[in-house]
């Protein structure tokens, strides 16, 4: 898998499985998948806006004519960079976990459109969101297209003569994460359970659930793994992410027991082993998830607080080009 090019576009994995890759895999630049057999099609995720989703669907149709009609769309989780193009997959059955659908209904596209539109009033958190997402994507025409079929636990589908297994593994990255496993092709589309060479971000947690999700992938006879962000990988990529999560959990525990808060702990943990991974500002979110796990707290964290902490770390390293000439009041 290490020899597969990490280039934008559609990649033929063989046997009717395809990956759509969007480098560099950072904030909002997500991957998708396509499964085709006997004239039937299943799309794994859409993209963050209509322009990028339309580009993907057009290229899929050119290279794989059967994809002109998508029979089933699976959303691996609720984040907009995997769902906001849903409206373009007209007529498809949209499948996700019940918790994914709940989250999509709780935070529809207009919520994020309003949030990104008000970035100047949100201080550091808003400036950071604008730089890494709001300035990159156009959400103006997004209309909610939530799942029409939901499940809990697992669901088996057929795409032509090909069996596809949907396996719920959340809460981890989000409350409703799932894996899309194609057993006969030894392929799994992971959504954001897999980040390759980028820090993952544990919004929901607990981290121990995410580690268990990695183990579920490794327990299966899989060879090709299409992550939500980053290059196509193999079992070694899963092991590497699992090591990251285990390391953060252990190191966060030491600092939790020493009385440090999450920001202090994130600044104190050495990430030398992962120094070439992108989006290091996400470490503070992951430490916060670890602390919530230690305290037995369920549910989601305070996202604006965490975006503020990520902004502080990001701007300390890179400056704040998004804020130049703006009326934002900064603390960094």
Image: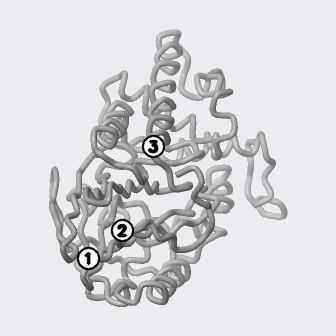
Q: How would you rate the neighbour count of disc 3 (Cα within 10 Å): few for under 14, some for 14-19, many for 20 or more?
A: few
Crowding near pointer 1: few (<14 within 10 Å), some, many (20+)? many
Disc 3/disc 2 C-alpha distance (Å): 29 Å
Residue holding disc 3: 302
Look at the image and name its color scheme. Answer: one colour
Residue at (54%, 22%) from the top-left corner?
261
Res. 233 in view = yes
Q: Residue at x 37, y 58 (%)?
A: 189
- In the image, farthest residue toward the right: 325
Looking at the image, is mark 3 or mark 2 earlier in the sequence? Answer: 2
Which of 251/34 is in front?
34
Report the residue marked by disc 2: 44
Disc number for residue 72: 1
Q: Residue furthest top?
A: 258
Q: Is residue 255 above or below residue 107?
A: above
Q: Quadrant of the C terminus?
A: top right
Image quarter of residue 101:
bottom left
- Can residue 113 be seen in the rendering of this structure? no
Q: Earlier in the sequence, mark 2 or mark 1?
A: 2
Mark 2 Cα-neighbour bin, 10 Å: few <14, some 14–19, many ≥20: many
């Amino acid at each position: 898998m290490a020899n597969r090019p990490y280039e934008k576009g559609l990649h033929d994995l063989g046997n009717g499985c395809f990956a759509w890759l969007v480098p560099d895999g950072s904030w909002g630049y997500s991957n998708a998948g396509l499964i085709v057999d006997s004239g039937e099609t299943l799309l794994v995720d859409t993209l963050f806006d209509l322009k990028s989703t339309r580009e993907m669907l057009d290229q899929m149709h050119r290279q794989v004519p059967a994809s002109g009609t998508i029979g089933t769309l699976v959303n691996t989780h609720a984040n907009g960079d995997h769902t906001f193009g849903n409206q373009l997959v007209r007529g498809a059955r949209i499948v996700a976990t019940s918790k994914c659908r709940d989250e999509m209904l709780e935070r529809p596209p207009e919520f994020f459109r309003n949030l990104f539109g008000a970035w100047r009033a949100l201080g550091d958190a808003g400036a950071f969101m604008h730089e890494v997402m709001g300035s990159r994507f156009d959400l103006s025409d997004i209309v909610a297209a939530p799942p029409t079929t939901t499940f809990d636990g697992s669901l088996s589908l057929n795409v032509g003569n090909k069996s596809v297994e949907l396996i719920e593994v959340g809460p981890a990255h989000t409350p409703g994460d799932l894996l899309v496993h194609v057993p006969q092709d030894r392929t799994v589309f992971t959504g954001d359970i897999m980040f390759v060479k980028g820090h993952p971000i544990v919004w929901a947690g607990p981290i121990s659930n995410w580690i268990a999700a990695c183990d579920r992938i490794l327990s299966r006879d899989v060879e090709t793994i299409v992550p939500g962000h980053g290059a196509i990988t193999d079992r070694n990529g899963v092991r590497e992410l699992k090591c990251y999560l285990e390391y953060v959990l252990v190191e966060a525990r030491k600092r939790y027991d020493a009385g440090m808060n999450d920001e202090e702990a994130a600044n104190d943990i050495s990430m030398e082993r992962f120094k070439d991974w992108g989006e290091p500002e996400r470490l503070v979110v992951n430490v916060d998830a670890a602390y919530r796990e230690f305290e037995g707290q369920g549910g989601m964290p305070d996202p604006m607080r965490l975006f503020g902490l990520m902004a502080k770390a990001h701007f300390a390293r890179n400056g704040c080009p998004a804020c130049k000439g703006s009326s934002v009041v900064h603390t960094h």
